[in-house]
Image: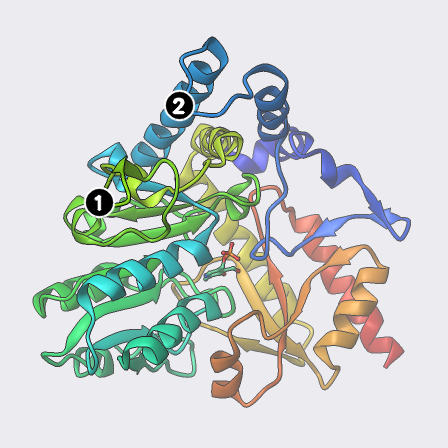
């Protein structure tokens, strides 16, 4: 579907967008933090609670079977969306953060010993740094860091030189939530595999914006959050290759994840249930599948092209302001703009823009090492989604001009 010619219809799918904030039309440009939800997703959640709410997997009764079928169908939707080989390679989690913690805990427990090395990058979200640091405290592993250049691009030569015979995993994001850089993950994976090292890709900022195929990438783990792709909060995905998931110890213990329990010996369930202890978010999974159908109906390539158009339009307009410093200027970029306007503090700018109904994010964006790289405290960040418009970008630019006059 061509988004530009259908933008009015698309915007009607998102009820929150008609809201007024401080008596102005809402201009929502904080999509990297979370996205708004279309009616179809909201209705799916309502339908889940009004028509098919019953616990999954355990019941012989009608409602339980319906709920189970919907939950498992959602898994297949995610599998096909990511291009995974098997539905049982899709583990439902609470989100990107939990998916990475799961791998750090289970892969770490199974495969890592004191002195082993994990490679991450300097542009990771805290959720792809701190789980490895916790593992460092528990097991004495070593964390190595791929640096990035002034444009916000990873230094692949430095990356290739980080490998040693103790390297056990590489964990990097596909798209930076601050710099917007689309990292060359295919090349990153090839280099790691050449060294016999598996790779985890944090897809929190890629899956909503560009087409992803985990088999084509040959990713060993790929993770994302439902709420950043027009789906509900509290549900996310861990894709893992069967060979790794099979070999890894369970993450949490409880119901669902067992085959047989006695006080003498407990055996674990098969994939994916081995990693899904307790009652899963079966309403969330079906609503996430609905969100995936929503973006599939529009087309991931159309979404990527439209968001690139928004990115170029916004970058041009902001550049014309003359005193905007951009953080992240790679030519291979997703629709995220981190900036500093003159010497106006990002927090002041964000607060005053809010008074004009414009929602941006300010601060370190859970990526403090990026701030340390540039020697700054934070940035003002505009991040775009498929429902944003050039008129909204004009409103942002006019808003920034107004705040500048105030100062
Ligand atoms: N990784 C990246 C690149 C992100 O942008 C985010 C959230 O902003 C996360 C991980 C964490 O996602 P969540 O809070 O949904 O677990």
Marks 1/2: CA–CA distance: 22 Å
Instruction: From the image, state whether disc 1 or disc 2 is nearer to you.
Output: 1
Res 367 visible:
yes
Tell me which corner region of the image, top left, top right, bottom left or bottom right, holds residue 339: bottom right
Q: Position of residue 244 (x, y in %)?
A: 18, 52
Residue designated by label 2: 58
Q: Position of residue 317 (x, y in %)?
A: 64, 64
Query: In the displayed structure, does residue 298 sit left or right of residue 259?
Result: right
Question: Which residue is rendered at x = 38% and y = 63% of the image?
Answer: 332
Res 82 visible:
no
Numbered disc total: 2
Query: In the displayed structure, does residue 115 sit left or right of residue 136?
Result: left
Could you say which is closer to the camera, residue 263 or residue 20? 263
Chain-order first, disc 1 or disc 2:
2
Query: In the displayed structure, does residue 381 sit left or right of residue 175?
Result: right
Residue designated by label 1: 265
Disc 1 C-beta below 8 A from ligand 1: no
Q: Secondary structure at mark 1?
A: loop
């Amino acid at each position: 579907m061509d988004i530009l010619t259908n933008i009015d219809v698309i915007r009607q799918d998102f009820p929150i967008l008609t809201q007024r904030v401080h008596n102005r039309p809402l201009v929502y440009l904080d999509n990297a933090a979370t996205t708004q939800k279309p009616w179809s997703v909201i209705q799916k959640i309502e339908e889940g609670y009004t028509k098919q709410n019953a616990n999954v997997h355990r019941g012989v009764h009608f409602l339980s079977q319906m709920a189970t079928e919907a939950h498992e169908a959602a898994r297949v939707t995610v599998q096909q969306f990511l291009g995974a080989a098997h539905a049982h390679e899709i583990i439902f989690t609470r989100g990107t953060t939990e998916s990475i913690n799961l791998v750090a805990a289970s892969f770490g427990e199974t495969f890592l010993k004191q002195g082993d090395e994990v490679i991450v990058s300097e542009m990771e979200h805290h959720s792809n740094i701190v789980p490895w640091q916790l593992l460092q405290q528990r097991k004495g592993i070593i964390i190595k860091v791929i640096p990035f250049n002034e444009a916000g691009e990873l230094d692949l030569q430095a990356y290739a030189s980080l490998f040693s015979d103790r390297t056990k995993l590489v964990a990097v994001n596909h798209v930076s939530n601050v710099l917007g850089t689309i990292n060359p993950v295919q090349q990153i994976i090839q280099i790691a595999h050449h060294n016999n090292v598996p790779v985890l890709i944090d897809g929190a900022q890629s899956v909503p914006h560009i087409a992803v195929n985990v088999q084509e990438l040959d990713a060993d783990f790929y993770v994302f959050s439902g709420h950043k792709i027009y789906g509900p909060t509290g549900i996310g995905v861990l894709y893992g290759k069967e060979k790794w998931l099979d070999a890894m110890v369970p993450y949490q213990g409880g119901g669902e994840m067992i085959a047989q329990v006695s006080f003498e010996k407990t055996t674990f369930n098969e994939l994916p249930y081995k990693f899904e202890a307790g009652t899963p978010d079966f309403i969330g999974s079906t609503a996430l599948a609905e969100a995936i159908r929503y973006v599939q109906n529009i087309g991931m390539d159309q979404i990527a092209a439209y968001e690139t158009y928004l990115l170029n339009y916004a970058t041009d307009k902001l550049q014309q302001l003359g005193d905007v410093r951009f953080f992240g200027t790679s030519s291979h970029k997703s629709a995220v703009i981190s900036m500093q306007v003159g010497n106006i503090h990002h927090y002041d700018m964000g607060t005053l823009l809010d008074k004009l109904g414009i929602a941006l994010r300010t601060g370190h964006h859970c990526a403090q090492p990026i701030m340390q790289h540039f020697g700054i405290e934070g940035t003002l960040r505009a991040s775009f989604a498929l429902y944003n418009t050039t008129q909204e970008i004009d409103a942002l630019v006019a808003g920034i001009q107004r705040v500048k006059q105030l100062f």
